[in-house]
Amino acid sequence: MSRLLFGLYVDYEKAIVMAYGIGMVIAFLFMRKHVFGATGKALTPQLKNFVLINILGLLQTLAISLWFERTVFPALGVVQYTETYSHVIGLSVLAVTSYFGHKLLTFR
């Protein structure tokens, strides 16, 4: 949702990065408390690993989103809502890879 709002004011790539930053803060708070129950563990190593995994995740999301938006959908003849569809696909892949990254590294 935030990517759509940012997209009203900045280009697609910047909107993805800005929305990702907001999502990162919210995700850390929820994952630490509700998903992995890691609130009793040291905060600094969790934050460091969380940021590292999310920087990689941002690059992955951006690459997948741009690839679908600029290559895959045009090749398939899809012309409407390509930015939104592409970003949803990028985020879907991210949901899986970041879950395992955080499970194995951040909140173990």
Image (spheres, rainbow, N blue to C red):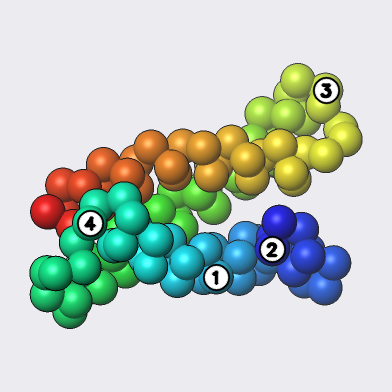
> Quick one: SS at disc 2?
helix
Q: Amino acid at mark 3?
A: Gly
As measured in the structure, the alpha-carbon distance from the residue carrying label 2 to the one carrying label 4 is: 27 Å
Q: Residue at x 21, y 47 (%)?
A: 103
Q: Which residue is at a point 46% across and 37% down the rendered structure image?
A: 93
Gap in Å between the C-alphas at discs 3 and 4? Answer: 45 Å
Mark 1 vs mark 3: give the one in front: 1
- Asked if residue 47 is positioned above or below residue 4 in the image, the reply reads below
**How many angstroms separate mark 2 from mark 1 (CA)?**
8 Å
Which label is found at residue 77?
3
User: Could you say which is closer to the camera, residue 42 or residue 64?
Assistant: 42
Q: CA–CA distance between discs 2 and 3?
A: 27 Å
Residue situated in front as seen by the camera: 51 or 83: 51
Looking at the rendering, in which quadrant would you find the C terminus? bottom left
The picture places residue 97, in percent across and down from the top left corner, at 34, 41
Give the residue pinned by disc 1.
22
Instruction: Locate residue 4 relative to residue 37 in the image: left or right.
Output: right
Q: Which residue is mark 4?
A: 37
Asked if marks 1 and 3 touch (Cβ < 8 Å), the reply is: no
Marks 2/1 in contact by CB < 8 Å: the verdict is yes
